């Protein structure tokens, strides 16, 4: 079944306490060249229907109404996940590390 | 400055209470054709250094050690964010809705 990924981030102009906490931890680990971190949410929505313009519009509406708090967050992307995507990217990276 | 996006999701085999809550809300809204939802995290990490293999390996290490709880989560992707990415996808979608 198709999966749609919705990504939500805190609005740029807002303080991101979670992000600040991670950035602080990185700095204490001597990694201050990573000087800003922002933490958002990633939703994977599975549907038993075919992907269509109508389904994507419905997800965009759900994203705005249910998944993001419009006062403090922005929906930054809505994409259809390629069928075999789960874990592919990481596998490729692990190959690079070895 | 370059931004690197790390995406973390709950392990497939684990129950995802947040996801279940969202799926339940969708079902009550009569949208049960969205039959599964999983909720993960999206980190945007800004660095004042050039992107290199070394920097990406460092982020992969940070992702495993700090950003994901290896017992319950998987790091599913680590990507460099194109410079003008923020908001582009959503603008394109909004054009499609009008």
Image (spheres, coloured by chain):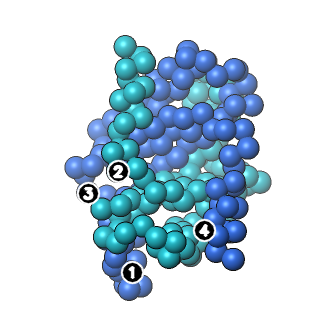
Chain colours: A cyan, B blue
Task: Give x and y (percent) for residue A49.
Answer: 34, 72
| Alpha carbon separation for disc pair 4 and 2 | 29 Å
Q: Do the residues labelled 1 and 2 touch (CB within 8 Å)?
A: no
- Find disc 4 in the rendering and name its residue: A69
- Find disc 1 in the rendering and name its residue: B31
User: Which residue shows up at 35% across the image and 61% down it?
Assistant: A2
Same chain? Circles 2 and 3: no
Same chain? Circles 4 and 1: no
Task: Give x and y (percent) for residue A64.
Answer: 59, 71
- Find disc 3 in the rendering and name its residue: B15
Q: Nearer the viewer, mark 3 or mark 1?
A: 1
Quadrant housing residue A60: bottom right
Q: How crowded is mark 4: few (under 14 residues within 10 Å), some or many (20 or more)?
A: some
Q: Which of marks 4 and 1 is in front?
A: 1
> From the viewer's perspective, is residue B57 above or below residue A57?
above
Taking depth in this image into account, of B85 and A64 the one nearest to the observer is B85
| Alpha carbon separation for disc pair 3 and 1 | 21 Å
Residue B23 appears in the rendering: no
- Find disc 2 in the rendering and name its residue: A83
| Alpha carbon separation for disc pair 2 and 3 | 21 Å
| Alpha carbon separation for disc pair 4 and 3 | 24 Å
């Amino acid at each position: 079944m198709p999966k749609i990924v919705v990504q939500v981030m805190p609005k740029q102009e807002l303080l991101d306490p979670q992000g600040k906490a991670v950035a602080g931890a990185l700095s204490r680990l001597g990694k201050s060249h990573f000087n800003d971190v922002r933490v958002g949410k990633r939703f994977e929505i599975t549907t038993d229907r075919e992907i269509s313009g109508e389904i994507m519009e419905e997800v965009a509406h759900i994203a705005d109404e249910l998944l993001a708090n419009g006062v403090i967050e922005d929906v930054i992307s809505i994409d259809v996940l390629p069928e075999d995507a789960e874990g592919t990217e990481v596998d490729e990276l692990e190959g690079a590390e070895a």
